[in-house]
Amino acid sequence: MISKLKERTKEVEEVIHELISEERVPELKKPMEHLIKAGGKRIRPALCVLACEAVGGKKKDAVHPAAAIELIHNFSLVHDDIMDNDDLRRGMPTTHKVYGIAFAINGGDGLFAKAFQGIARAKLPPEKKEKVLNLFADAIFDVIEGQAMDMAFEKKEKVTTKDYLEMITRKTGRLIENAVEIGGVCGGATKEQEQALHKYGFAIGRAFQIQDDVMGIAGDPSKTGKAAGNDIREGKKTIIVLHALEHAKDATPLKKALGNKEATKEEIIKAVKFLEDTGSIQHAKDYAMQLSKDAKEAISILPDNEAKGILMDLADFTSTRSC
Amino acid sequence: MISKLKERTKEVEEVIHELISEERVPELKKPMEHLIKAGGKRIRPALCVLACEAVGGKKKDAVHPAAAIELIHNFSLVHDDIMDNDDLRRGMPTTHKVYGIAFAINGGDGLFAKAFQGIARAKLPPEKKEKVLNLFADAIFDVIEGQAMDMAFEKKEKVTTKDYLEMITRKTGRLIENAVEIGGVCGGATKEQEQALHKYGFAIGRAFQIQDDVMGIAGDPSKTGKAAGNDIREGKKTIIVLHALEHAKDATPLKKALGNKEATKEEIIKAVKFLEDTGSIQHAKDYAMQLSKDAKEAISILPDNEAKGILMDLADFTSTRSC
């Protein structure tokens, strides 16, 4: 699936490369391109291009906004890694570990600004561009707000599943959702098609993050690139953990390991086993699966074409992926 | 002059307030509004509104872009203060000193995103909005690039006056320049008027920073809010310092204090005296004055009206201000 997406985003890569290679100051350029060059799945720009094609648009109508979306995604990762003090991303040292915090903040800012240059230069009539700009600016604000909520949760005693879903909808979901919607606008979607793409984007955005949470607890470290039980040690209040805390009578095995950076391997194994026994991992898997189903149903009204077919496959992929 | 500008930007303040008060997550809202609430001269949004009026536009055409410009200015200050590890700004503790680095990065990002929401919501026809978006995105990128250059200079042995002027043109000049130009676009400037405003903005942007450098070395601490000789201790390679290094045979009194955080009061006084004796401070003052003259000449072609009059006064203010 991922190689299929990369085929789709070849031109998008070219636009990203073009935007970044204009940069003449190496102290800014290097931190800007560090994470971009490390790769990534490029799911968001692929979704944008596919949504455009699915409603009858041409790929070229969506490549600039798609590039902008990927740049913003990378901006948010660079800054989040500083805020969360993470050392690794995409199997590489994070930007601030290589270039220091000051230049990583600056590099992230550079990616942010480049994203808007991407929108500004999109080959779209002004009316469409205005719509794209609105969707894009709103999505970015939500991503930033989601990060604030995520950081605030770490200090909060009580986080509910509702809080969690609100947070991931903004932090991860909204950019995916708006990537799809923006693609639709670029491709000239009808009102009905726009709504269908909106629903699709919302559902897979949420499914994508929930599956990420499943992988963070029960994933194969050799595929996810994360240590086993990583999210438990980090104390992440994911939908899985919240489900267990809300439903189990005695959550001691989980509480012993949750947020405990010194937790032993055995304690982690016991916590994961506990989450299995409470049905919390299965609950998350089922939920993600249902969202994939909702996503597919939403776009069933689109005309049948190759892009629609890939969007359908992508909906399944988001809730079944192992990396 | 400053109170005159604030009269001009009342509606801009309202738009800024409106954009920020939408925010529902206090952990994001507080760092976002910390610096905004601390005040500031609001020169950039005033320039934007004045340029719009000077070419016959209505204030309301420019208030959203003007608000966006002020938000971006504040974003850059919040992030720069983290990168430069500064403790005070506008007489208050900097955002990261109050809320910590993580929430200050996030708050700066929030201001950045809000700025684009401001542009997205501007009450302008799509064609004008597109032009504004292009000018705005380019200006922001230059601001970020200027900060990268500024940080890189600290590690460089040799910085020339040309390098310095390139850096300040981007870091400080471009946003001022484009604020004026954007105002012109909002007000429906002719091609000739646009060029005049562009020249005016370029000149006062540069004059503004040079006068800032003069104040940083020879300013009155009770007015500038900076310790006397602050820029010398910080080792800033300003136009004044570079002029002295390039022209003096023996720059020992300067070199003893430059970049020496432990420099005594006496050493600072000697360094400032040295910069006076070499004519370097006067050189910077003369240069700023010439730029103010260029700025006024550039907009002499505009129709005579109140806004033009204030722009003329502002051109003088940038090179004579003491705060």
Image (cartoon, coloured by chain):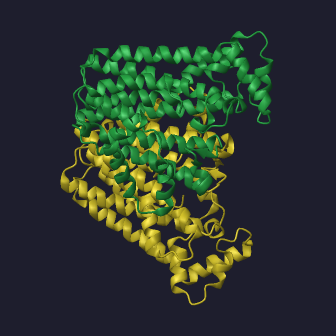
Chain colours: A green, B yellow
Q: Residue B285 at what x, y percent from top left?
A: 47, 72
Q: Residue B84 at what x, y percent from top left?
A: 61, 57
Depth check, front residue: A120 or B46: A120
Q: Is residue A205 above or below residue A64?
A: above
Tell me: A255 left or right of A110: right
Depth check, front residue: B36 or A205: A205
Outermost residue toward the bottom?
B249
Task: Work out whether residue A137 can be spotted.
Answer: yes
Q: Residue at x 56, y 39 (%)?
A: B107
Q: Residue B125 at what x, y percent from top left?
A: 24, 35
The quarter of the displayed image where residue A253 is located: top right
Q: Is residue B141 above or below residue A320?
A: below
Q: Residue B129 at what x, y percent from top left?
A: 28, 39
Q: Residue at x 33, y 63 (%)?
A: B295
The quarter of the displayed image where residue A256 is located: top right
Depth check, front residue: A196 or B200: A196
Depth check, front residue: A253 or B147: A253
Q: Quadrant of the N terminus of chain A?
A: top left
Tell me: B82 left or right of B262: left
Tell me: A134 left or right of A285: left
Task: Work out whether residue B123 can be spotted.
Answer: no
Q: Is residue A270 above or below residue A106?
A: above
Tell me: A65 left or right of B80: left
Number of labels in the image equals 0
Q: Is residue B242 above or below residue A164?
A: below
Q: Residue at x 41, y 52 (%)?
A: B141
